[in-house]
């Protein structure tokens, strides 16, 4: 590990885990750990899964699903914006051509 990195503790379901993390990423790691811990707490409170590993896997799958859904929505939005941009450019080009023909 370089001089900028350090090992920090994060707590998941009441158990501390030591993670290597650069200083500049510490806040992001803390936020990610809190998000994951919250999801794990929710899953565990439902009482359907037992064992930290199973709860962690289910939480990770849920978060991955949400990430993929959000990414898909972003790509869809980008596609829609590109199509709209093309329509605007075509309309402006037609308008400019009409001005030249007049």
Image (spheres, rainbow, N blue to C red):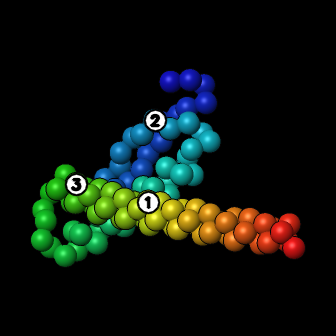
The answer to whether the residues at label 3 and label 1 have Cβ atoms under 8 Å apart is no
Q: In the rendered image of this protein, does residue 45 appear above or below residue 85? A: below
Is residue 80 rendered to the left or right of residue 62? right
The residue lying toward the viewer, choosing from 17 and 84, is 84
Picture quadrant where residue 57 is located? bottom left
What distance separates the C-alpha of mark 3 from that of mark 1?
A: 21 Å
Picture quadrant where residue 94 is located? bottom right
Q: Residue at x 53, y 34 (%)?
A: 6
The residue lying toward the viewer, choosing from 63 and 14, is 63
Residue 92 is at least partly visible in this image: no
Is residue 79 rendered to the left or right of residue 10? right
Picture quadrant where residue 83 is located? bottom right
What distance separates the C-alpha of mark 3 from that of mark 2?
A: 21 Å
Quadrant of the image containing the C terminus: bottom right
- Farthest-out residue, top: 2
Q: Residue at x 12, y 71 (%)?
A: 48
Q: Which residue is mark 1?
A: 71
Picture coordinates of residue 67 (x, y %)? Answer: 39, 60
Q: Give the mark nearest the N terminus, 3 or 2.
A: 2
What distance separates the C-alpha of mark 2 from that of mark 1?
A: 28 Å
Q: Residue at x 79, y 72 (%)?
A: 98
Give the number of the disc on residue 20: 2
Q: Which residue is mark 3?
A: 57
Which of the two marks, 3 or 2, is nearer to us in this view? 3
The residue lying toward the viewer, choosing from 83 and 66, is 83
- Under tag 1, what secondary structure? helix
């Amino acid at each position: 590990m370089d001089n900028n990195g350090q090992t920090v503790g994060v707590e998941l379901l009441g158990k501390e885990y030591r993670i290597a993390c650069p200083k500049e990423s510490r806040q992001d790691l803390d936020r990610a750990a809190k998000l994951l811990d919250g999801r794990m707490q929710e899953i565990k409170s439902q009482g359907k899964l037992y064992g930290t590993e199973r709860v962690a896997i289910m939480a990770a799958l849920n978060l991955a699903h949400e990430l993929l859904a959000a990414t898909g929505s972003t790509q869809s939005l980008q596609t829609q914006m590109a199509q709209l941009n093309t329509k605007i450019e075509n309309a402006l080009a037609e308008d400019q051509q009409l001005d030249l023909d007049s």
